[in-house]
Image (tube, rainbow, N blue to C red):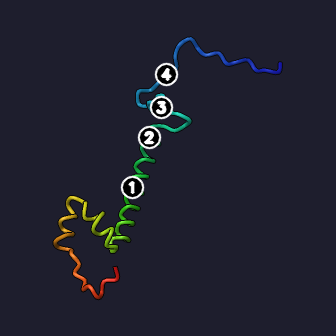
């Protein structure tokens, strides 16, 4: 007898405890679930935010970035124009 006989189930359902885990089907596409996509999206958003902050921080001394990019931010722009304006003598200005 090369193949084992399949196990036959009882006619009545098995007992399921109300205190046990509640298993249910989780939809997926290629083992990628909605939870996985959400977690990766949050991590990518945080990484992108930190990268954007780093780029703005490192390039904030460049006048083109200072005036054109940072000047267009609604809350920061007017403050940059008035309070943080840099007065450089024309002879000392390399640009």
The numbered disc on residue 15 is: 4
| Left or right, residue 44 beside residue 80 | right
The numbered disc on residue 5 is: none
Residue at left 42%, top 43%? 38
**Residue 23, image x, y percentages:** 47, 30
| Left or right, residue 92 beside residue 55 | left
**Residue 68, image x, y percentages:** 29, 64
Q: Closer to the N terminus: mark 1 or mark 3?
A: 3
Which residue carries the number 3 mark?
26
Q: CA distance from mark 3 to mark 4?
A: 23 Å
Instruction: Kindly report which numbered mark, 4 or 1, lies closer to the viewer in this rendering.
Output: 1
Residue at left 21%, top 74%? 84
The numbered disc on residue 46 is: 1
**Helix or strand or loop: what does disc 3 sit on?**
loop
- Location of residue 48 by image quarter: bottom left
The numbered disc on residue 35 is: 2
Residue at left 78%, top 20%? 3
Disc 4 + disc 2, Cβ < 8 Å: no
Q: Closer to the N terminus: mark 2 or mark 3?
A: 3
In the depicted view, which residue is nearer to us: 43 or 10?
43
Quadrant assignment for the C terminus: bottom left
| Left or right, residue 30 beside residue 94 | right
């Amino acid at each position: 007898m090369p193949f084992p006989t399949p196990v036959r189930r009882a006619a009545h359902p098995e007992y399921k405890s109300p205190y046990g885990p509640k298993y249910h089907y989780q939809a997926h596409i290629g083992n990628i679930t909605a939870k996985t996509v959400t977690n990766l999206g949050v991590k990518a958003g945080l990484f992108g935010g930190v990268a954007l902050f780093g780029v703005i921080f490192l390039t904030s001394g460049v006048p083109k970035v200072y005036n054109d990019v940072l000047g267009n931010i609604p809350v920061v722009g007017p403050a940059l124009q008035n309070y943080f304006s840099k007065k450089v003598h024309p002879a000392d200005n390399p640009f």
